[in-house]
Structures are given as structure tokens and as C-alpha cells.
Amino acid sequence: MQECGQNWEEVKSSLLQARSKDLPYERVLSSMCTYPHPVAIEAHNMFIESNMGDYGLFMGTYELEKQVLGMLGDLLHNSCPYGYLTTGGTESNIQAVRAMINSSQSIKKPNIIVPSSAHFSFDKISNILKIDVRKARILPNLAVDTGHVSSLIDKSTIGLVGIAGSTEFGQVDPISELSKIALDNNIFLHVDAAFGGFVLPFLNEHIPFDFSLPGVTSVAIDPHKMGMSTIPSGALLFREKKMLDSLKVETPYLTINSQFTLTGTRSGASVAATYAVMKHLGKEGYRKIVDRCISLTQLLIKETKSIGLSPVIDPVMNIIALYVPDPRKIREELALNYGWQVSITKEPSSIRLVIMPHMTEETILSFVRDLNIVINQSASSTRLENDKIFVNRTSK
Ligand code: 0PR
């Protein structure tokens, strides 16, 4: 740190320089985040100093948080949820599993069962909470094999996890079956709806995934993904108060006596942003956003089929995985030559595209044009390589 401070103009110029290296979202097809709604940004800035880690000082923001929980509960069929706004899916998942462990004190070496398609936050959970995280097989449709889940349950199993919108493929596990298994075995069921939570309630097709299923004991849902709020905005909701209470630590010198959260200091700005965007859009507004993303997803599927590509599964939501030859190379070429950001999946290997609200019909069409060129060029360079090998071999 330098001794003397710089004036704002100088600081601002370095900020702008840094910002110019950040990618705008327009060509980003690899992210579950997007431009926050303008209303969320405005609300965020209004509450920039608010700290929910000591909410006795910020009772107004605290009231907004309670209202957000109520709105989320309504969306997820829970008229009286217990929970709080987190920093995102990772924190929500950690806290959900921590609550399972704290509520099962009599089990000495507990385990949980998650689909092998679960987000990598569950690897962090295994490391931090020292719990055995067992991974259940997924079926060819990339949803969890519930038969395998059942077979992994033993007397030390304290809970199951189902995913409503898997990170790589956007698949939804059969949560109603998992709910039955959880009830039959008297264990917890956490649903990771970090992505799908703001998509599934607004689809035409009804896919049950939330507290409407009696075995579901907690749900993670992220306003900073399809909820159009600012980062960091996640939420964790429990069905029962005692699960939230199991996370309680005493905080004697604060304006509040206890905390349930993982972080201490916590953004009130995110709370206000989430409140504002949810109030402003209402269910109708979110339905329009989801409808549009789904139409664009269908357009992308139609256009990529016309160039001979097929999806790994028929998309359930606005996430598409496409079979292409050598996905890693295609991803590199798309970024290098055209500035498109796509991700790749592990098993099966494919390119993954998340159709967020920042995408347009025009960007989708120009992406497919560029993808077609990249695939053809890559195929002809592979042919050239093969020809060279053939010539080298025959000339020896
Ligand atoms: N659960 C699911 C199903 C997720 O997809 C994610 C994140 C999480 C939990 C964890 O959420 P947080 O990252 O909020 O803690 N899924 C994305 C991913 O890892 C997050 C992301 C977003 C990645 C934007 C890249 C990006 O540009 O792929």
C-alpha cells in the first residue's frame, strides 16, 4: 500500500482499466449469473452499509429479510419457513448438512448420500464437516438412481440430498421418490435448488421438488442466479424451527444474543436487493423471464440440430449440453476466435450452455453460426493431421 492516497479520478481510472478486462455477459454462455435487475442494483446501493451480522442495528433490513423468507416460502410451498439469506448455494448446502449433523448427535460417524452429479460444494462439505459424503449413481437421463440411493443407506445415514437443476445438465432428481425414501428411513432430505428454485415454479410443466413433498426438510435457492438479484444472494429454508435452532451460537456482545449463520458480517444490501426484485417482478415477472429463457433454449436446440448436433438430454430447464467432437478444443476455439464462453461437462463429455436472461435471439443465432464454423474447421484440421500421419508412415 502506498504512503499517500490517490485522488478519486486516479483510483477510478485504475478501476475502469480493471473493468475493461472483465468480460461483459453478452457472449457468456457458461455462467449461472447474469446482470442483476436494475431495481436490485438500486436497492443494493441504498443499503450498502447494512450488516445483518448484527441486525439489531439494522431492524429495517431485518424486516425485509423476514419478508423475503415469506415470499420464498410461498414460492416453495412452505407457509412458515425458518431460515435466512446466505451468500449462495455453497453456504446454504454447508449449513443444511451442518444442521443434519447437529440434529443427529447420537450418530457417531454420520454419512449423507448425494447424487454423483451434485455440485462441488458437497466435496467442500465432506472436507469441512468431516462427514462421509456417499455418491449415488446417476441414470442415463442424468437423474439420480434412487435404487442405488436406497442401497447406500445404513444405520449411520442421517440424510439425503436431491438436486433440482443440476449444475452441469439442469436435470431434476426424482425428489418425490427421494422424499418417500427419506420418510421411510426417518432421515433428512435437503434439496439443492440453487439454480432451479427460480425456474421450476415458473415452467408450464409441473415438476415437484419443494416443501409440497412431505419428506423435504430443507431447500437451497439462490436469488443471485435466476432470481436476478445482486451477488451474494442465496437462501436456506428449513421446514422445522429446531433444525435452524441446531445452528445457533451465542453472540453475547452483539445487539442480538445468537446467530444461525455461517458468516458473521453479512450483506444487508443483498437482502434489500432480493426484496426489491422479488416485489417488483412478482410471479408474473419471473414467469416472463423463465418463458423467454426456455424459448431461447428451444431455439438453440432447433438451430444446433440443423447443424447435426444433439443434446445429451432434452433440456428440462435453460441448460443445454451438446455432444461435439473434442469439447475441450471446441471450447478453446470458440473463446479464442469469437469470444464465446462455454463450459464443458465431465461425464458424458460435452459443451454446456446456460441460457441466462442476458441472451437474445440474435446472440443465439450468431453463436450457432460460429459453433458450426469451429466444428467444421476442427474436423478438417483433424483430417489434415491424419493425412500427415498417413503420408509420414507411407513414405518411411
Ligand atoms: N448448487 C448448485 C446446483 C449449483 O449449480 C451451484 C453453483 C451451487 C450449489 C453453489 O452456488 P454458489 O456458487 O452460489 O455458492 N453453480 C455454478 C457453478 O459452479 C456457479 C457459477 C456461477 C459458476 C457463475 C460460474 C459462473 O460464472 O457452475
Image (tube, rainbow, N blue to C red):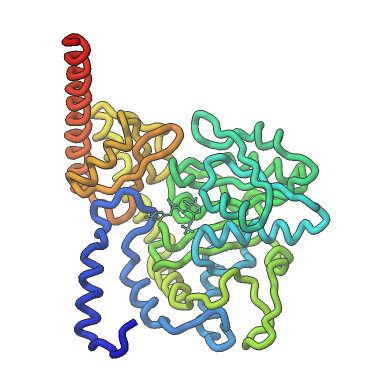
Report the side of 103 relative to 324 (left or right): right
Q: Is residue 396 left or right of residue 236?
A: left
State the residue in front, 275 or 99: 99
Q: Is residue 301 left or right of residue 55?
A: left
Quadrant location of the N terminus? bottom left
Look at the picture and state if 354 lies above or below 7: above
Position of residue 248 relative to residue 252, above or below, is above
Name of the residue lying farthest toward the right: 106
Q: Quadrant of ligand 1?
A: bottom left
User: Where does residue 257 sit, x and y in percent of width and height?
Assistant: 68, 83
Q: Residue 102 appears in which quarter of the rendering?
A: bottom right
- Left or right of 333 on screen, residue 72: right
Q: Quadrant of the C terminus?
A: top left
Image position, residue 288 (x, y; %): 35, 55
Task: Check the image and report above or below for 52 versus 131.
Answer: below
Residue 35 horizontal/vertical position (percent): 31, 63
**Number of numbered discs:** 0
Q: Nearer the viewer, residue 251 or 199?
A: 251
Pick the front one: 233 or 39: 233
Residue visible at 44% across and 37% down in the picture = 346
* Residue 353: quadrant of the picture: top left
Residue at x 17%, y 34% (from the top left corner): 373
Q: Position of residue 351 (x, y in %)?
A: 34, 38
Q: Residue at x 64, y 67 (%)?
A: 82
Between 72 and 135, the one nearer to me in the picture: 135
Residue at the (46%, 66%) spot, across then down: 233
